[in-house]
Image (cartoon, rainbow, N blue to C red):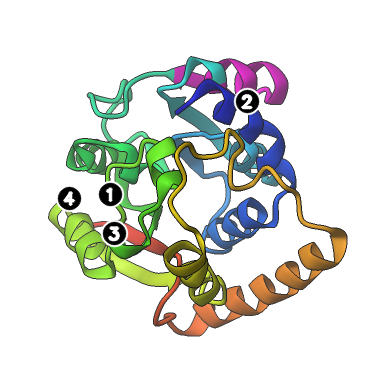
Amino acid sequence: MEEQLVTDFFTEEKEHWWHIAKRALIRQFINGRNLKILVAGIGGGMICKELKETGYHVIGVDISPVSCKYVNKNLGIPVINADLEKLLMFAKESFDLTIIADVLEHMDNERQLLSEVYRCLKPKGTVIITVPAYSQMWSSWDTRLNHKRRYSLCALKKKIIEAGFSVKKISYYHMLLYPFVYVYRKVLCLPKGKYSERSDFAVSPNRLVSRLFTFYYTLERSLLNVTDLPFGLSIFAVGVKRG
């Protein structure tokens, strides 16, 4: 990822409703006390911080030395700078839970990471995954973020099962936004010679918009407790290690 995007992300992840909603959804599906959690791909570190404050034992691993240094120094989270497409430096059955939030789409070989996560999880351990949905939603923003792909529900489910997990939950989310973003990207957003230097999250919404989205995502998370959503900009999945 571009260095400027990494720098921007530290601020945006704290304040933008998109990131806040994703972290709230992840936390909603974490059960248990005194869990040892591995965050594979730490971003700006806010999910690590929130989980630590809840009382969980959190360790991060990320390929970006900038992210690792920032999260370790400013948030006090132990983080290892390592390539997620290689063997993870953790013993077998070390963790109760692993979070892979918006990471698999960056990888040439996502099967390697899923296999390593399986190895590092305790029996009945849980993996929580988020990825961007629908190849037809590909845009210059995916290119800037070094995405390799976007996923269909069936494709992600297949990869989780092939890695040895049973699928406890899998659904689209960000449902309300999907039609608006589709129209923007496919109809209104004409090709440009050079895309903006700012990220999609660089413009912070005003307070009213943030409150409206906060209210909406509270409803969406309530729905996800009882059912799956038929479409959305992203996919959320929970897998359980067999055995």
Question: What residue span does the magenta drawing correspond to?
Answer: 67-80
Q: Could you say which quadrant of the image residue 4 lies in?
A: top right
Q: Tell me which label, 2 or 4, sits earlier in the chain.
A: 2
Q: Quadrant of the N terminus?
A: top left
Q: Residue at x 65, y 79 (%)?
A: 219
Give the residue pinned by disc 2: 7
Give the residue pinned by disc 4: 163
Residue 177 pos. (x, y %)? 56, 71
Q: Residue at x 71, y 69 (%)?
A: 213
Q: Residue furthest right?
A: 207
Q: Tell me which label, 2 or 1, sits earlier in the chain.
A: 2
Q: CA distance from mark 2 to mark 3?
A: 27 Å
Q: Amino acid at mark 3?
A: Tyr
Residue 147 visible in image:
yes
Give the residue pinned by disc 1: 149
Mark 2 vs mark 4: in front = 2
